[in-house]
Amino acid sequence: MVAPHNALRKPVSSGDQAESVMRVVAEKPIAVRRSFADRFADAGFRWLITLCALSVLAIVGFFVYELIVNSQPSLKEFGWHFFVGQDWDPVSGEFGALPFIYGTLVSSFLALLIAVPLSLGVAIYVTEMAPGWVRTPISFLMELLAAIPSVIYGLWAIFVLAPILRVYVGPALAKSLGWTGFFSGPVYGIGMLAAGVILSIMIVPIIASITRDVMAAIPQTQREAVLALGATRWEMVRIAVLRNARTGIIGAIILGLGRALGETMAVTMVIGNRPDITKSLFAPAYTMASVIANEFTEATGTLYASAIVEVGLALFLVTLIVNALAQMLVWMTTRGMPSRAHGQ
Amino acid sequence: MGVGIEVRNLKAWYGNTEALHSVNMQMGANQVTALIGPSGCGKSTFVRCLNRMHETIPGTKVEGDVRIGSTDIYANGTPAVEVRRRVGMVFQKPNPFPTMSIYDNVAAGLKLNGFRNRHRLDEIVEKSLKQAALWDEVKDTLKKKSGASLSGGQQQRLCIARALAVEPEVLLMDEPASALDPISTGKIEELIDELKANYTIVIVTHNMQQAARVAGFTGFFLLGTLVEFDKTEKIFTNPSDKRTEDYITGRFG
C-alpha cells in the first residue's frame, strides 16, 4: 500500500472490501495527487540528505587537497626529513617539525594520563555511588566546564596553575621523582607539564560526560546479576559497568584525545613555545597547533609559509593515525562480542 | 544440600511506601515454594529480601528476621555479600554478561570468590551447565561464543548455570520463565524439578499452572501481605481464604 489515503488504512480482509477500497481511491483523485507529491518529497528528501552526507566527504577532501598543494615548496625541499628534523630556524630556512609533533603527542598523552582516571572516577561516582541530589549538580558543573572558552583556561593556567606548579608541585616532583629524569631542571611553571595539566582539565568534561552516559545506559539487570553472585560494590562496577561500557569508554577517550591534539589557545599560552625535545616535563616545549597559530602571520617567504602548512598536514596525519589506532583497539577488544546486552 | 528458610515479621519499604506488611513464612529444605499473586503484590520484593537484593535499590528499608539455615541474614555481623554467595538468584529477564564467553559467564561467580584453579573451574563449569541442561547445546562453543549470542531460553539456562556454579544453598527465581516461549519454559520447569534434590528453591510466578506443576508449597500474596501459604494442592483445590479462591479462579488479578 503506497497511497496514504485513509481508506487504505482500514484493514482489508476480503476481496470485496479491497474492491470497494479501490473504488474509493478511484473516485477521489486527490489521494493520487497527494501520493505523487509525497513521492516527490521522498525523492527530494533523499537527495537532500545524500548531499549533506557528501558535503562531509567534500570538505575533508578539500582540506587535504589544500594542505598538500600549499605545502608543496616545503615538501619538495625537505621531503621526509621534515617530519624527523629537529631544527626549526626560519632565519636560515631550516624547517624540521619533530619538536612540534613530539610536543603535541607528549602533551596530549600527559593529558590522557591525568584525565582518564579522573574522568572514570567522576563517571563511576555519578552513576553508581552518588545520591540523587548530588548527581544533577555534578553533571551540570561538569558540562559547564566543557563550555568555558579555551582562552579562559589559558589565562587561568598562567595566573593560577603555573604558579602552583612552580612553587609547590614542581619542587615536590623533582624531589620524589627527579631520578626518572622526567622532572629535572629548573621549574618555570610554564612548560610541558603545565600544558598537559591544563589539557587534562579541558578534556575531563568530555570523557567524563560521555562515559557517564554510556554507563547510565547499562541495564540495571546487569548490575543485579553481578551483585546476586555475591560481588562487592567495586567488583560490581568492574564487571557490570566498566566491562560492559569499555567500547564506549574508549570512544570517549578518543574524543578527548582529539580535543587535546588540536587544542591551540590554552596550550600556546602555557607550554612555553620553544621548539626543543627535552626529556624533562618542566622544560618549555611547542605543539603543532601552537606553532601554526603563533607563526602563520609572520611567515615571510613561500618556504616558511609552506612549512607552516605542512605542520598542519602533519597534525592532520597524526590525528588520523591516532584515531585509526584507537579504532583498531576498539575492534580488537570487542572482536566477536557485542558491545551491549540484547533486548534489555 | 538445601537449607530451610524462616521469615519472621518481614517488612520492606520503598521510600515511605510499605511494600511488605509483616510476612511470616517457613520454607522447608529442598522444597520448591511458589509465590503467586497479582502484579505489585510484593512477591518479588519478598524474594529480593531473601538475598538482601532489596537494599541495593536506593531509599529502601527492611525490617524483621530472615534465617537461611542457621544464619540470621539481617543480623548486624552478616555481610550482604556473604548472603548473596549462599543464596543464588535468577531474574525475570535473562541477563548474561554480554562481553563474556559462555564459559566466563558461568565461571564469573567463582572467579569473584578468588577461585583460580583452572582444572577445577573447568569441572565446575561443565557440571553447572549440565545441571542447567545447557551443556550439550554449548559445549563446542564454550569459549568462542558470547553469552548474549544464545537464544532467550538458552540465556536463562546460562543464568541458572551461573547461579549454580557458586554452589548456593538456596535458589531464588523471580519469574524465570516469563520472557520465554513454551518450550523453553518447559525446559526450565523440568530443571526446577531436578534441582530441588540439591537446592531449596523459591520461585515467583505469574503463571498459576506453573506453580501447580513445579511447587510443593505455594504462597499467595496480596497487597503486601501473605494471605495464604500451604501445600500447593490445598491452595489450588481447597483454599482456606476467600481471596485466594477469588484469585485462582480468575475473579481478579
Image (tube, rainbow, N blue to C red):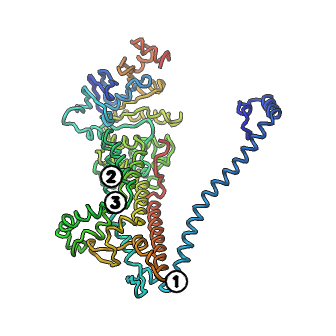
Using a 10 Å C-alpha cutoff, classify the residue at mark 2 as few (fewer than 14 neighbours), some (14 to 19) or many (20 or more).
few
Residue pointed to by mark 1: A73
Tell me residue A324's x, y (percent). Answer: 47, 66
> Looking at the image, is mark 2 or mark 1 nearer the viewer?
1
Residue that appears at 36% across and 69% down: A268
Tell me residue A46's x, y (percent). Answer: 66, 52
Q: Amino acid at mark 2?
A: Arg
Residue pointed to by mark 2: B120
Mark 1 — on which chain does it sit?
A
Mark 2 — on which chain does it sit?
B
* Residue A7 shows in the view: yes
Using a 10 Å C-alpha cutoff, classify the residue at mark 1 as few (fewer than 14 neighbours), some (14 to 19) or many (20 or more).
some
Q: Which of disc 3 and disc 1 is earlier in sequence?
A: 1
Q: Are marks 2 and 3 in contact (CB under 8 Å)?
A: no
Mark 3 — on which chain does it sit?
A
* Residue B163 shows in the view: no
Q: Amino acid at mark 3?
A: Tyr
Answer left or right for A139 relative to A304: left
Measure the C-alpha gap from mark 2 to mark 3.
56 Å
Answer left or right for A26 relative to B156: right
Count of picture labels: 3
A48 shown above or below A259: above
Tell me residue B212's x, y (percent). Answer: 45, 24
Residue that appears at 33% across and 63% down: A154
Residue at the bottom extreme? A92
The answer to which image quadrant residue B238 occupies is top left
Answer left or right for A105 relative to A33: left
Secondary element at image label 3: helix
Q: Quadrant of the N terminus of chain A?
A: top right
Q: In the drawing, what numbered circle is on residue B219?
A: none
Residue pointed to by mark 3: A153
A56 shown above or below A315: above
